[in-house]
């Protein structure tokens, strides 16, 4: 066997082993860069100070909504709702997400804001997923 032929065989084997590994490592995790959208609305329930009387219910303008990608510990994106309480996160890849908004604690256990979290699964590319209203207290 000639040296050129040995090199060609070695290079071919190397490519045959490398290409499948590259294809496996290209599997994308949840996050931006896809073609899917998650969208919905934030509904605000306004109570008196002791949470005994519901004073008003409305779709909340300018409420921050956060998106967590997969198992991340912190949010990967956030957006403020529009005048009618709508929000949307575009250009997402398939995977698991958590959407949340911050709310007053209706149990009066704390003065801190607490997250109202909704889990969302994007099963395929090019999905538009509407989630139920996120209810927060104000």
Image: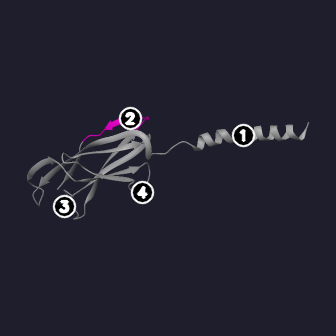
Circle 1: is it few (<14), some (14-19), or many (20+) Cα within 10 Å? few
Query: What colouring method underlies this structural image?
Result: one colour
Hey, which residue is sitting farthest bottom in the picture? 111
Residue 37 badge: none
Residue drawn at 21 percent across, 65 percent down: 111
Residue drawn at 71 percent across, 40 percent down: 17
Earlier sequence position, callout 3 versus callout 1: 1
Q: Please state which of the two labelled residues, at mark 3 or mark 1, is closer to the viewer.
A: 1
Residue drawn at 42 percent across, 57 percent down: 73
Against 58, residue 20 (above or below) is above
Q: CA distance from mark 2 to mark 4?
A: 25 Å
Against 109, residue 19 (above or below) is above
Magenta region, residue range: 122-132
76 drawn magenta: no
Q: Please state which of the two labelled residues, at mark 2 or mark 3, is closer to the viewer.
A: 2
Q: CA distance from mark 1 to mark 2?
A: 35 Å
Q: CA distance from mark 2 to mark 3?
A: 39 Å
Question: In which image quadrant can residue 39 be found?
Answer: top left
The answer to whether residue 99 is left or right of residue 53 is: right
Label 2: which residue? Answer: 127
Label 3: which residue? Answer: 108
Label 4: which residue? Answer: 73
Q: CA distance from mark 1 to mark 4?
A: 37 Å
Earlier sequence position, callout 1 versus callout 2: 1
Q: Please state which of the two labelled residues, at mark 2 or mark 4, is closer to the viewer.
A: 2
Earlier sequence position, callout 1 versus callout 4: 1
Earlier sequence position, callout 4 versus callout 3: 4
Label 1: which residue? Answer: 15
126 drawn magenta: yes
Could you say which is closer to the camera, residue 52 or residue 9? 9
């Amino acid at each position: 066997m000639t040296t050129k032929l040995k090199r060609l065989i070695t290079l071919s084997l190397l490519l045959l082993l490398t290409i499948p590994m590259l294809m496996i490592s290209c599997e994308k995790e949840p996050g931006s860069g896809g073609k899917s959208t998650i969208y919905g609305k934030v509904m605000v329930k306004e109570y008196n100070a002791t949470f005994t009387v519901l004073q008003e219910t409305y779709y909340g303008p300018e409420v921050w909504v956060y998106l967590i990608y997969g198992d991340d510990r912190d949010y990967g994106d956030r957006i403020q709702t529009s005048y009618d309480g709508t929000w949307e996160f575009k250009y997402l890849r398939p995977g698991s997400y958590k959407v949340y908004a911050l709310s007053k604690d209706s149990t009066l256990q704390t003065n801190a804001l607490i997250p109202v979290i909704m889990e969302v699964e994007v099963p395929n590319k090019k999905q538009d997923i509407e989630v139920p209203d996120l209810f927060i207290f104000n």
